[in-house]
């Protein structure tokens, strides 16, 4: 009996310490993680966002074989001396033929990469308005717009904290199964936020764990280089061996015409019964030329980074080496990283990725708000240090949770409002993103009482304006894109409207909670006292606290963050 | 078939939810009888398993499993959202999903 008791206490001790860890690991990088989660979510639609941001470009994909032929003709003409050519045949998601080549003698200080996109219909280079498009979100997600490699390190450290927060959160959560379906917004305050946080975390848990872990695995080489340094003489050897398709082959410095690539692509596609996703030509026009074909990432879950490839002699077209069946190790690593990138996902699964990732963003957001809700409830009145930390975190919360969304909307709006031919406009789009976020933070600290309702409303209005401004500045607005079945444009506009509705609803909740805190208890009491009921199979110790009826004031869910002075919170909840 | 997988996941979660004391009481205002609990739970888990099979039948096992996890998350979140504001309708929808799933699977 005594041993059982000691064990129970040990478990409680572990839970307490994990709760502490969860609270602080989640808070320190919470704002960065919120921005990373949100931009990462958007990055699942990277090519679609780019397409929306360059509305003047309209193209239809053509088969890879013809596309590669067009690309080779263009490159022979414009970049015959390049060190390397990269060709990405068009797909349904990216209808343009994308090419990248490395010039032989780059200007000092530059790497000499030139990017060209071809219209499959004409074979001519297309130039839309200058924009970073979806690439901005993709890169921000792991580089945070900070110089290499610091941004990647910061993102990785934040990711590590996320992993710690998730695992400690699972240990802390006493009743994953009992509370699986429990969401009680009417109970208000900490309880409601706790429920919401739990639901968003537990239901999306497979995704959240996968995305956090695989995100770190993607930076494995940077984060844990010791193994590579022990086995290989230099990192180049490692990459050549693992990422064989990227291997750089040396030139022989004798001119020789490069073989037509299109028949090789046809051969590979027939062999794989799949698509070619990338063509790499090393030393084109040289006797040492090689042509490497890599299978498309959309063809398999594990092909995101590590896909089957074939290498041919670039002059004779002779098969040199290749891999169809990847080893178990490579495949495992491929699945982990492939799942993160989600390049294999069909439209339906892509939307699942998007929605569950949004739930993850909500998980971080509710977690940040929960920190305030719990803290405020315990705060002694008149504690100046406590008041300061609450104001600081609450301000950062409002300025980031609403501010990043406002920033995203501003990024899109500026894309439409700046003249299409303005030089350097892509820089201004990014500036708009950060200015909107920064201004939101400033506003949050200047108007601590109004901040939530105002900033959420601003984010909602800005998102709602995106399709409106699109309608005034392009001919591809909802009125035309919907009947035409142009789902990239229509889906983008509709998603903005859905986001606007969500933030508008949140703003209204925040405003109501601020204006009518006195009415809240009556409404909350009308709700069923669910937590007060005895639940079978639940430890008695956990019950004793929860069984107490909620104290005099139980505020509406949003009151917790919107109106500090009017809320007295229910006693410390049963879940940490 | 994908829709069938989704319906099975939703129906399965509804049954599991109804097989829990708290949610059963909320809905019917009486304690969950033992003779209801076991069938509800068995049905719930079976429906979730069938949902995996349905997803794998369309997409193959590697892709299908990923798709299934997505279906589970979305179906669960949808059920909880629905349950909060329209509890009866949410579980009725669960019953309808259970009926619709075999039809959708055949179609």
Image: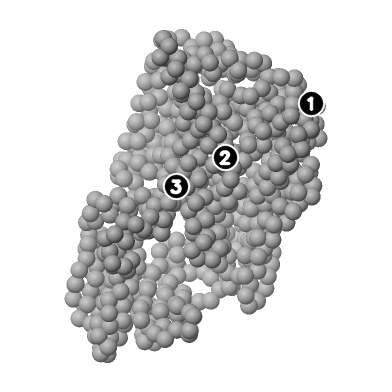
Say whether marks 3 and 2 touch (CB < 8 Å).
no
Q: Secondary structure at mark 2?
A: helix
Residue that mark 3 sits on? A211
Residue at position x 41%, y 83% from top?
A103
Q: Residue at x 74, y 26 (%)?
A: A568
Counting labels gives: 3
Residue A172 picture location, percent across and down: 50, 30
Mark 3 — on which chain does it sit? A
In the displayed structure, A319 sits above or below A511; it is below
Q: Please name whichever residue, A95 or A169, is drawn nearer the observer in this view of the structure.
A: A169
How far, Cα to Cα, is label 2 from label 1? 34 Å
In primary-sequence order, the first of circles 1 and 3 is 3
Q: Quadrant of residue A430?
A: bottom right
**Residue A311's x, y, as percent?**
24, 71
Q: Nearer the viewer, mark 1 or mark 3?
A: 3
- Determine the secondary structure under disc 3: helix
Say what secondary structure mark 1 lies in.
loop
Q: CA distance from mark 3 to mark 2?
A: 21 Å
With A559 as the anchor, is A115 left or right in this view? left
Along the line of sight, the residue nearer the viewer: A431 or B15: A431
Of all chains, the one bearing label 2 is A
Q: What residue is pinned by disc 1?
A: A519
- Which residue in the protein does label 2 denote? A24
In this picture, residue A299 sits left or right of residue A528? left
Residue at image coords 38%, 16% = B39
**Disc 1 to disc 3, how far (Cα)?**
42 Å
Q: Residues within 10 Å of mark 3 (few under 14, many from 20)?
A: many
Same subunit: marks 3 and 2 = yes
Q: Nearer the viewer, mark 3 or mark 2?
A: 2
Quadrant including the C terminus of chain A: top right
């Amino acid at each position: 009996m005594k041993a059982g008791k000691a064990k129970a206490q040990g478990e409680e001790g572990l839970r307490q310490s994990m709760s502490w860890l969860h609270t602080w690991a989640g808070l320190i990088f919470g704002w960065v993680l919120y921005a990373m989660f949100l931009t990462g979510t958007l990055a699942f639609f990277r090519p679609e966002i780019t397409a929306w941001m360059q509305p003047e470009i309209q193209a239809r994909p053509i088969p890879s074989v013809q596309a590669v032929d067009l690309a080779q003709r263009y490159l022979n003409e414009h970049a015959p001396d390049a060190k390397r050519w990269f060709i990405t045949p068009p797909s349904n998601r990216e209808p343009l033929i994308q090419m990248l080549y490395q010039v032989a003698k780059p200007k000092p200080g530059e790497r000499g990469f030139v990017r060209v996109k071809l219209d499959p219909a004409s074979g001519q280079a297309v130039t839309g308005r200058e924009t970073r498009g979806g690439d901005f979100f993709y890169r921000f997600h792991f580089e945070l717009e900070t110089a290499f490699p610091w941004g990647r390190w910061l993102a990785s450290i934040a990711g590590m904290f996320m992993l710690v927060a998730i695992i400690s959160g699972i240990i802390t959560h006493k009743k994953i199964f009992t509370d699986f379906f429990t969401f009680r917004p009417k109970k208000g305050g900490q309880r409601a936020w706790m429920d919401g946080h739990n639901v968003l975390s537990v239901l999306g848990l497979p995704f959240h764990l996968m995305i956090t872990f695989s995100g770190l695995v993607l930076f494995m080489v940077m984060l844990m280089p010791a193994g590579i340094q022990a086995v290989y003489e230099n990192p180049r050897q490692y990459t050549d061996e693992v990422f064989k398709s990227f291997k750089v082959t040396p030139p022989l410095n004798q001119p020789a015409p490069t073989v037509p690539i299109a028949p090789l692509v046809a051969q590979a596609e027939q062999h794989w019964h799949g698509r070619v996703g990338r063509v790499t030509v090393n030393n084109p026009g040289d006797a040492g030329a090689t042509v490497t074909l890599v299978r498309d990432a959309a063809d398999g879950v594990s092909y995101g980074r590590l896909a089957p490839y074939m290498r041919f002699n670039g002059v004779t077209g002779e098969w040199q080496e290749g891999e169809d069946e990847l080893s178990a190790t490579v495949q495992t690593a491929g699945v982990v990283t492939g799942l993160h990138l989600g390049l294999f996902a069909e439209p339906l699964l892509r939307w699942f990725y998007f929605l569950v990732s949004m739930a993850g963003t909500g998980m971080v957001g509710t977690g940040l708000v929960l920190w305030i809700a719990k803290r405020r409830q315990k705060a002694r009145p008149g504690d100046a240090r406590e008041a300061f930390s609450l104001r600081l975190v609450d301000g950062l919360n409002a300025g980031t949770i609403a501010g990043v969304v406002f920033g995203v909307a501003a990024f899109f709006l500026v894309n439409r409002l700046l003249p299409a031919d303005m030089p350097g406009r892509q820089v201004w789009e990014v500036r708009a993103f950060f200015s909107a976020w920064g201004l939101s933070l400033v506003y949050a600290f200047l108007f601590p009482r109004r901040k939530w309702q105002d900033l959420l409303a601003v984010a909602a209005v800005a998102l709602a304006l995106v399709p409106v401004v699109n309608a005034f500045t392009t001919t591809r607005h909802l009125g035309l894109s919907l009947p035409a079945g142009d789902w990239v444009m229509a889906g983008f506009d509709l998603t903005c409207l859905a986001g606007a509705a969500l933030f508008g609803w949140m703003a209204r909740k925040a405003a109501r909670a601020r204006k009518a805190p006195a009415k809240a208890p009556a409404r909350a009491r009308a709700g069923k006292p669910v937590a007060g009921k005895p639940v079978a199979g639940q430890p008695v110790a956990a019950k004793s606290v929860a069984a107490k009826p909620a104290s005099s004031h139980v505020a509406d869910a949003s009151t917790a963050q919107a109106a500090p002075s009017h809320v007295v919170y229910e006693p410390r909840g049963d879940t940490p | 078939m994908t829709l069938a997988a989704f319906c099975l996941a939703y129906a399965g979660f509804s049954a599991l939810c109804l097989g829990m004391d708290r949610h059963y009481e909320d809905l019917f205002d009486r304690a969950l009888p033992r003779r209801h609990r076991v069938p509800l739970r068995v049905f719930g888990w079976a429906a979730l398993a069938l949902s995996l099979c349905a997803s794998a039948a369309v997409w193959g096992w590697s892709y299908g499993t990923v798709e299934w996890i997505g279906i589970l998350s979305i179906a669960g979140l949808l059920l909880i959202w629905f349950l909060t504001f329209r509890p009866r309708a949410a579980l009725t929808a669960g019953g309808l999903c259970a009926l619709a799933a075999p039809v959708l699977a055949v179609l």
